[in-house]
Image (cartoon, helix red, strand yellow):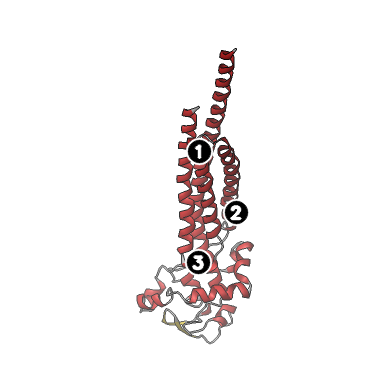
Amino acid sequence: MALSNNVIGCINFVAMLLSIPVIGAGIWLAMEPDNSCVKILQWPVIILGVLILVVALAGFIGGFWRIPALLIFYLIAMLILIILLACLVVFIYMVTIRGSGHMEPSRTYLEYHLEDYSGWLRRRVQSSFKWDRIRTCLSSTSMCAQLNQSYKMAQDFFNAPLSPLQSGCCKPPTQCGYTFVNPTYWISPINNAADMDCLNWNNDQTQLCYSCDSCKAGLLANLKKEWRRADIILLITLVGLIWVYLIGCCAFRNAKTEEIFRKYKQGYADN
């Protein structure tokens, strides 16, 4: 029984270690400028990681100090958390399965269209109430100002590997036909009715294309890339937790079997 309990404790220690990538993924998302402005995924991931840590700690204590109630709590709570983590992994995959950039002639960077992305993600940015807060947050960053320092010539800028956010928010859409002066200042074409974003572009350095659908699409493209990376971490952790949980269940069952057999032998000896 003592050996089985020690095994259970060691297994739950591994589960504690597996909570670290989940918490780390949430903290990484919170530190990314776009995610810190949107504030959708990072807190659920961090909270789930902390819960896994707490439950695994309870199982660790229950295993080494032989507290059956904590072990039962661990088995039930960890199963629930594994199911929640699996649902989160599937959810992230489903909402990020759509959407990609579009190539434009004589441009290295890609253009992004809002309608390409999942309805759930679009609803996070389409309402004026939500977008006003996100736009204010994005415009306070230096991502567009950095372009002016890096690219002086038009051809250098056209060949630049811009991020989705920079492509969508810092310049007008290519189809509008604006003339390059610098990365964040463009001369308006004679006809700028090709797209509503062409009318929304503003050379004011606090405005730029932050009100454009292309900016919203660029934000979603950035979120998709970062969420997919986090999803891979969560998936690997999920597989590890399932493996640890199954081993823990077997060890717990063996420990209970050993205890019953020990009590049976003790009762037989007393008789």
Residue name at image x 63 percent, y 62 percent: 120
Question: In this view of the protein, can residue 21 be seen by the observer?
Answer: yes
The mark nearer the N terminus, 3 or 1, is 3
Upstream in sequence: badge 2 or badge 3: 3
Q: 10 Å neighbourhood of mark 3: few (<14), some, or many (≥20)?
A: some
How far across and down, in percent of the image, does residue 219 sit? 52, 68
Question: Mark 1 is on which residue type?
Answer: Val
Task: Say what secondary structure mark 2 lies in.
Answer: helix
Q: Residue at x 46, y 41 (%)?
A: 13
Left or right, 153 with reference to 123: left
Q: Which residue is mark 2?
A: 91
Which dot, 1 or 2, sits closer to the camera? 1
Where residue 49 appears, as percent x and y from the top left, is 51, 51
The image quadrant of residue 75 is: top right
What is the quadrant of the C terminus in the image?
Answer: top right
Mark 3: which amino acid? Answer: Ser
What label sits on residue 36 in the rendered view? 3
List the residue tagged with mark 1: 244
**Residue 112 seen:** no
Residue sticking out furthest to the front: 270
- Tell whether 115 sits left or right of 1: right
The amino acid at mark 2 is Phe
What residue is rendered at 52% in x and 45% in y? Answer: 238
Q: Are marks 2 and 3 in contact (CB under 8 Å)?
A: no
User: Crowding at label 2, few (<14), some or many (≥20) Cα neighbours within 10 Å?
Assistant: few
Q: Where 67 sits versus 169, above or below?
A: above
Q: Secondary structure at mark 3?
A: helix
Residue 222 image point, x, y percent: 50, 64
- In the foreground, 9 or 114: 9
